[in-house]
Image: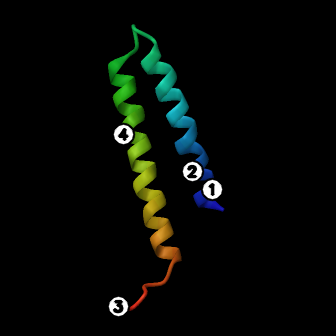
Amino acid sequence: MRICELEVEHRDLDSVIETIIKDPNHDELQLRRLKKRKLQLKDYISLLKMQLSPDIPA
């Protein structure tokens, strides 16, 4: 399922970000790009999940 693949990529990015942060000489631009990609993935995963579950009337 596409959502599962995206969740795996999101977790992988989390690990990469943690590793980069530990390096005192890390590339700030690369770190910002990875964080942005991680946020985009999170938003896209949320969107896909909302499309899967039907609206529940109040």
Q: CA distance from mark 1 to mark 3?
A: 30 Å
Residue 39 image position (x, y, % from top left):
39, 46
Disc assigned to residue 4: 1
What colouring style does the render use? rainbow
Q: Nearer the viewer, residue 56 or 26?
A: 56
Task: Tell me: 56 left or right of 16.
Answer: left
Q: Residues within 10 Å of mark 2 (few under 14, many from 20)?
A: some
Above or below for 6 versus 54: above
Picture residue at 52% right of the left edge, 36% below the top: 13
Q: Nearer the viewer, residue 58 or 5?
A: 58
- For disc 2, the marked residue is 7
Q: Nearer the viewer, residue 33 or 52?
A: 52
Dot 4 amino acid type: Lys
Q: CA distance from mark 2 to mark 3?
A: 30 Å
Q: Residues within 10 Å of mark 1 (few under 14, many from 20)?
A: few
Disc assigned to residue 36: 4
Q: Quadrant of residue 1?
A: bottom right
Q: CA distance from mark 2 to mark 1?
A: 5 Å
The residue mark sitting in front, 4 or 3, is 3
Q: Are marks 2 and 3 in contact (CB under 8 Å)?
A: no
Q: CA distance from mark 2 to mark 4?
A: 15 Å
Q: CA distance from mark 4 to mark 3?
A: 34 Å
Residue 52 image position (x, y, % from top left):
53, 75
Dot 3 amino acid type: Ala
Residue 21 image position (x, y, % from top left):
42, 20
Picture residue at 38% right of the left edge, 91% below the top: 57
